[in-house]
Structures are given as structure tokens and as C-alpha cells.
Image (cartoon, helix red, strand yellow):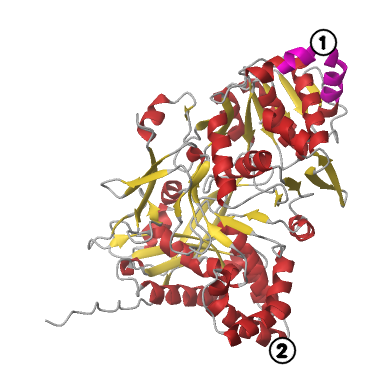
């Protein structure tokens, strides 16, 4: 990465490398300015005593200075370890202790306070550097340093340390560690995934070439820096291609900042696309009759021909003209409102996206694709080529990647992005990656013979069988449910049982808006979740999904017979989800076993008491009586029998 930085500073010295919105104004740094900022920081870290091989933890939101910290650490032979900014202190303690971080670069007072709370547990930690000085004036600065102060210190020591800096950078090899990223820990403690320079650079090169990414592209960096996707997009591909990384001012201004930047290359997990669609539907519910009628008419046309037009397939002249009119009246303004008007390549990954949601965006003319990847693969295992984009597959093998399906149906891959090893975990490394470099994904799937596209069924450990032997694939059903704006999250149960049941989280924003239009009074999420009209609406969604599932002969047994609306949102702070918003099924099954037992009984309601974690870290309990609802199921269509 430091070598690519040097190349970009020479090739694109006046081109913007980073932008950040601060106090409502976009600040820019060119590639030449970025190189100077990073070198000053690297010199400051040398002066602070950073040794080759030291681990430097980086904690905070997406800020150019924190991205610079990653490359500065690499420049002097240290290993950057980004952490999730919203992690609780005890979660940080595990990672910092596990990697033995000697140095921490933190964004602000909040992150410094977390480190202070756990410092006694961190025997290796020596120095902490903070970026934002607000609130830090009266802190003990004996082992606490201002980011700008470290840069100033480095610049002052340039005469004595520049030779050492250049020697350190010159010693970096293609097989040295580039970064260590921790998994989200869906089933246990997070694992430190060691990725080499070869892993990151080869993957960045291949994936950039696949989509023709270049220095003229723009990306918005808003996803957690600890996530491998953000590292590839905002560091790997950015440094390989020389495109610009834009950092929003805050989470609350994200949509405004997205509209202002208008990225050409965009990534979002399914939850972001689901939320955007929910907001669109809420706005249209409040729109006037004419506007709503126009929207429904042209969206009907878009669903029918939009995807074909995007893929260059034959479409009638009249439909093309009508679609063009729709672009002027509906699709164009809607894309601009979403901030996606300039997107040339868009991706979603992390978990499966609902086909209806995926098709909605493509129908607008947004070139949204799915990719399949893992931290252990440096993201990319498969990608969807232009003209071959479908909602039911994740595409073909990425350049340089090989894929095979094991005897049990599990997906395996190998390629240039395959991780080196799990840090301090030789046993897990051996069970995940074999001697020939094949990695077990833990996902069940198959490759279509005609197209070569990979189809993922579900997590291998989650796929099971109903009591009568029919296939059980919970994620398939959950994604269908989450297409509805009213449903934020769903967890389906049924493995080894006679029928499927579900927990559902309502979307407070969408359902609240719906309730207000119907003059339904409520004072809390819990009260709204238990309202009879809300239960009726969710039951309608469940029964519609059941009818859809019944059409799939292989998965028709996954129809939901009973459900309840949870009295609280599933939360990462309560251990129910990972920091990347993946459901921790085993924890939920254990924590809410009383509710699951009630769903498989004849009870019509159940009382429960649940421990929760408040924003300030305190623990408490909430009690509720939940209503259990039966949902109508649809008899599967009988397969046709060929005439004898």
C-alpha cells in the first residue's frame, strides 16, 4: 500500500484522494497531500517507538485520518487492526488483548474512555493517540497523545528518522501482513484473520479490472472500518485504482452527503437497501393521489422491463419510450433522492438480499449486483458480470478464484485472496483451510451446470430438515419477510420440527408512520408491537409469504404456521446480533427458549422477562406479555406427472 501511495502521488498529484465533510463543508486532500500527511504520521509513530510487527489498533468512524493511520502503520512495518467503533468496552478488551496491541489510535473522547475503562486488562498497551481533541484537555497525557501533535513530532524528527522510514518501507514484502481483521463472531469469539499484501493487492487488482474501476470513480466510505468490505473498497481498490474516498460528516447526515457526492461505485449491505426502500414506501404512502398513481404506474412498467433494458435485452419500442418518460418523471428523481443517480456499479453482500428488493433497484436502472465473499477471502469469491445479473445467484467465480462443492453441499474456494491464518488459532486455521489452500465457507450451495453461477441456499449449519424430511432453510424465508417495509428482522425456527414458526421485529419508523396515519396511539416500541392492528398487518405479510413459498416445491415446507412480534429489537449490545447485523441464532434460541416453546404449544399468549443493555452500558430488564398468532398456510401445488 505505501508503494501504491507513492505511485498515486506521482501519477495523480493534484487529484482528490480523500474528502471529508466537516461543519457542512467538504474538505479535500490530493494524493500528494495524502502522502505527506501519512509520512508525517509514520515518522511520528517511529519517534513514539513503534517497532516492526507491532499491532496498532484503530478505532473510530470513517475519517481520512484513520485511513491514513492504517497506511502509516503499514509504512513502518506495523500491523493495523481496525475495531468496530460501536463495540462495547469488553468487546474491545478481547480484541486488544488477543492481538497484544501496544498502540491505539482512537477517534475521540468516547473511544478513549472505553480504552481507559479496560486499560488494566491490557498488559501490552503503552500509548493511545486521539484524533478529536474535544473534551480531552484535562486528561492525563503521560501516555495520551494528540494526532496532530504526533504528526508535528514526526515532521520535527524528519532529519533523523527519514532514513529509517525509507528503510522500513523498503523492507516490506508481498508476503508480509497487510492487515488483521476480526470476524464478527456469529458463533463464538471473533477470530483474527491475517491478510497479506498479496491477498489484498491481487484481490483489489482483479476485482477492479472486473468492473473497470478507475481513478475517475467516487466511493462513499460509511461502513465500519473493521469490516473487510470497507478495507477493500476504501484502501485496497482505492489505492490500486487511485479513485477518491469520501467520508460523510456523521451517520445522521449520511443520506444528504450521499446525494451531494453521487458516488459512481457504491456498496451497501441488504439492510441499507431495505431501509432506503422502506423510506421510499413511507413517503409514497403520504403522497397525493395523482403522485401515488403515477408512481404505481411507472413502477409497474419498471418491474416489467427495467431490468431487461439495463441488461441490454430486447424490449419493445413503445415500452422503451414509456420507460424513458418514467425516467424523467419518476426513476431519475427517485435515484437522485436516494443518492444513487450516478452509480455505475453497485454491490450488495454480507447476507442474501430479498429478490423483490434487488429487482426494485435494478428496475430503476441502477446496476446493482450481488457478490459473495468472506473476510477470509479478502472479500471476493464470486461476482456478477454485466448482463448476467440475477437475484437468485451470486454470480461466477471472481478472477483467479476456483470454486467447488463438497459432498455435503458445502461451498469451498481457493484463490489469491485466501487468508494466511487465524492469529493464535492454528486449530481453526487447519479446520478452515486445507493444505491445498481450499477454504470451507460454511455455506451450502450448488453451481448451475448451464451458467456456472453459484447459488447459495443458506448457512450450512442452519440448513436442516423438518420432521418429515422436507428441507429447512430459514434465511430464504427471513429475506422474503424483510422485503416488507414493516418488518425489520425475522428469525425462523423449524429444524427437526413438524412446522416452522417465527420471531418478527417490526420497523419502528415504518410501522409508527403507518400507525399515525390510522390514528393509532402508542408510547413505545413494545406497545406498538402488541397492537392488534399491527399484528393483523404482519399476519397478512406472513400469509402472503406462505403463498409464495408454497410455489417452491423444494422449500414449501418452510411456511410459517405461528409467529410472534418480539417486545424489543434484536440488538448487538445484547449479544443477539453481530456488529455487522447478522443474527446469532444459537444465542437467540437459548435466550428466548420460553418463547419458542410457547410457539410450539397451544398457548395464545406468553409472558416473558428479558435482560437488556442500555446505551450507557447499564443492564436492566423488560417484561411483556406477547400474543401468539396462527398464520394460514397454502397447500403446495402438486408437481405435474408426465403422461405415460
- Secondary structure mostly seen in the magenta stretch: helix
Quarter holding residue 325: bottom right
Q: Which mark is residue 485?
A: none
Give the class, few, some or many, for how many residues have Cα within 10 Å of label 1's Cα (few <14, many ≥20): few
248 over 378 or under it: above or below: below
Secondary element under disc 1, as helix, strand or loop, is: helix
Residue plotted at (87% across, 52% down)? 24
Q: Residue furthest top?
A: 160
- The answer to whether one can see residue 234 in this image is yes
- Quadrant of the image for the N terminus? top right
**Residue 154 included in the magenta stretch of the image:** yes
131 over 564 or under it: above or below: above
Q: Which residue is mark 2?
A: 290
Q: Which residues are magenta?
A: 149-166
Where's residue 402, x and y in %?
40, 43
Of badges 2 and 1, the one in the foreground is 1
Secondary element under disc 2, as helix, strand or loop, is: helix
- Quadrant of the image for the C terminus? bottom left
Residue plotted at (42% across, 62% down)? 476
Q: Nearer the viewer, residue 503 or 54?
A: 54
Give the class, few, some or many, for how many residues have Cα within 10 Å of label 2's Cα (few <14, many ≥20): few
Q: Which residue is mark 1?
A: 160
Residue plotted at (36% across, 53% down)? 445
387 over 322 or under it: above or below: above
- The answer to whether one can see residue 525 in this image is no
Where's residue 446, x and y in %?
34, 55
Where's residue 7, x and y in %?
72, 33
Q: Residue furthest front?
A: 11
582 over 546 or under it: above or below: above
| Left or right relative to 14: residue 321 | left
Instruction: First in sequence, mark 2 or 1: give its number.
Output: 1
| Left or right relative to 219: residue 109 | right
Amino acid at each position: 500500500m505505501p508503494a501504491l501511495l507513492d505511485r498515486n502521488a506521482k501519477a495523480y498529484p493534484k487529484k482528490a484522494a480523500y474528502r471529508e465533510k466537516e461543519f457542512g463543508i467538504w474538505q479535500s486532500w490530493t494524493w500528494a497531500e495524502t502522502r505527506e500527511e501519512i509520512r508525517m504520521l509514520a515518522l511520528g509513530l517511529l519517534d513514539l517507538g513503534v517497532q516492526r510487527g507491532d499491532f496498532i489498533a484503530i478505532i473510530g468512524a470513517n475519517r481520512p485520518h484513520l485511513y491514513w493511520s492504517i497506511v502509516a502503520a503499514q509504512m513502518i512495518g506495523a500491523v493495523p487492526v481496525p475495531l468496530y467503533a460501536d463495540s462495547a468496552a469488553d468487546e474491545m478488551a478481547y480484541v486488544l488483548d488477543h492481538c497484544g496491541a501496544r498502540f491505539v489510535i482512537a477517534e475521540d473522547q468516547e473511544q478513549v474512555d472505553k480504552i481507559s475503562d479496560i486499560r488494566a486488562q491490557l498488559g501490552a498497551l503503552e500509548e493511545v493517540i486521539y484524533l478529536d481533541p474535544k473534551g480531552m484537555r484535562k486528561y492525563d497525557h503521560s501516555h495520551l497523545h494528540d494526532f496532530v501533535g504526533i504528526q508535528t513530532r514526526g515532521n520535527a524528527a524528519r532529519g533523523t528518522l527519514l532514513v529509517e522510514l525509507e528503510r522500513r518501507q523498503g523492507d516490506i514484502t508481498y508476503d508480509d501482513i497487510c492487515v488483521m481483521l476480526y470476524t464478527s463472531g456469529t458463533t463464538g469469539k471473533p477470530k483474527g484473520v491475517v491478510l497479506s499484501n498479496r491477498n489484498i493487492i491481487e484481490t483489489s487488482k482483479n476485482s477492479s479490472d472486473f468492473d473497470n474501476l478507475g481513478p475517475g470513480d467516487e466511493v462513499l466510505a460509511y461502513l465500519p472500518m473493521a469490516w473487510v468490505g470497507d478495507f477493500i473498497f476504501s484502501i485496497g481498490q482505492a489505492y490500486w485504482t487511485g479513485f477518491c474516498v469520501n467520508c460523510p460528516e456523521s451517520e445522521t447526515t449520511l443520506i444528504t452527503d450521499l446525494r451531494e457526492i453521487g458516488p459512481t461505485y457504491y456498496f451497501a449491505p441488504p439492510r441499507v437497501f431495505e431501509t432506503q426502500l422502506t423510506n421510499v414506501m413511507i413517503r409514497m404512502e403520504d403522497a397525493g393521489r395523482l403522485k401515488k398513481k403515477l408512481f404505481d404506474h411507472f413502477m409497474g412498467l419498471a418491474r416489467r422491463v427495467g431490468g431487461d433494458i439495463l441488461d441490454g435485452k430486447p424490449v419493445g419500442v413503445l415500452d422503451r419510450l414509456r420507460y424513458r418518460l418514467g425516467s424523467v418523471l419518476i426513476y431519475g428523481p427517485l435515484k437522485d433522492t436516494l443518492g444513487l443517480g450516478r452509480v455505475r456499479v453497485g454491490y450488495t453482500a454480507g447476507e442474501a438480499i430479498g429478490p423483490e428488493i434487488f429487482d426494485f433497484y435494478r428496475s430503476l436502472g441502477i446496476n446493482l449486483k450481488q457478490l459473495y465473499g468472506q473476510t477470509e477471502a479478502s472479500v471476493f469469491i464470486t461476482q456478477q458480470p454485466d448482463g448476467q445479473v440475477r437475484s437468485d445467484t451470486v454470480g461466477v467465480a471472481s478472477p483467479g478464484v476456483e470454486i467447488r462443492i463438497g459432498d455435503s453441499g458445502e461451498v469451498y474456494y481457493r484463490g489469491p485472496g485466501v487468508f494466511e491464518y487465524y492469529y493464535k488459532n492454528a486449530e481453526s486455521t487447519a479446520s478452515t483451510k486445507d493444505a491445498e489452500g481450499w477454504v470451507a465457507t460454511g455455506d451450502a450451495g450448488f453451481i448451475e451446470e448451464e451458467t456456472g453461477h453459484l447459488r447459495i441456499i443458506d448457512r450450512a449449519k442452519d440448513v436442516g430438515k423438518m420432521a418429515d424430511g422436507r428441507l429447512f432453510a430459514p434465511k430464504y424465508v427471513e429475506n422474503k419477510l424483510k422485503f416488507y417495509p414493516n418488518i425489520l428482522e425475522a428469525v425462523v425456527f423449524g429444524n427437526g420440527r413438524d412446522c416452522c414458526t417465527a420471531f418478527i421485529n417490526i420497523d419502528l419508523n415504518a410501522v409508527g408512520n403507518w400507525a399515525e396515519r390510522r390514528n393509532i396511539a402508542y408510547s413505545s416500541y413494545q406497545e406498538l408491537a402488541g397492537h392488534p392492528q399491527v399484528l393483523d398487518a404482519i399476519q397478512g405479510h406472513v400469509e402472503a409469504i406462505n403463498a409464495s413459498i408454497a410455489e417452491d416445491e423444494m422449500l414449501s415446507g418452510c411456511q410459517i404456521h405461528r409467529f410472534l412480534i418480539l417486545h424489543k429489537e434484536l440488538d448487538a449490545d445484547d449479544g443477539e446480533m453481530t456488529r455487522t447485523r447478522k443474527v446469532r441464532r444459537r444465542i437467540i434460541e437459548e435466550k428466548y427458549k420460553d418463547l419458542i416453546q410457547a410457539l410450539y404449544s397451544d398457548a395464545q399468549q406468553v409472558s416473558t422477562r428479558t435482560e437488556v443493555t442500555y446505551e450507557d452500558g447499564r443492564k436492566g430488564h423488560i417484561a411483556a406479555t406477547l400474543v401468539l398468532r396462527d398464520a394460514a398456510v397454502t397447500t403446495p401445488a402438486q408437481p405435474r406427472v408426465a403422461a405415460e
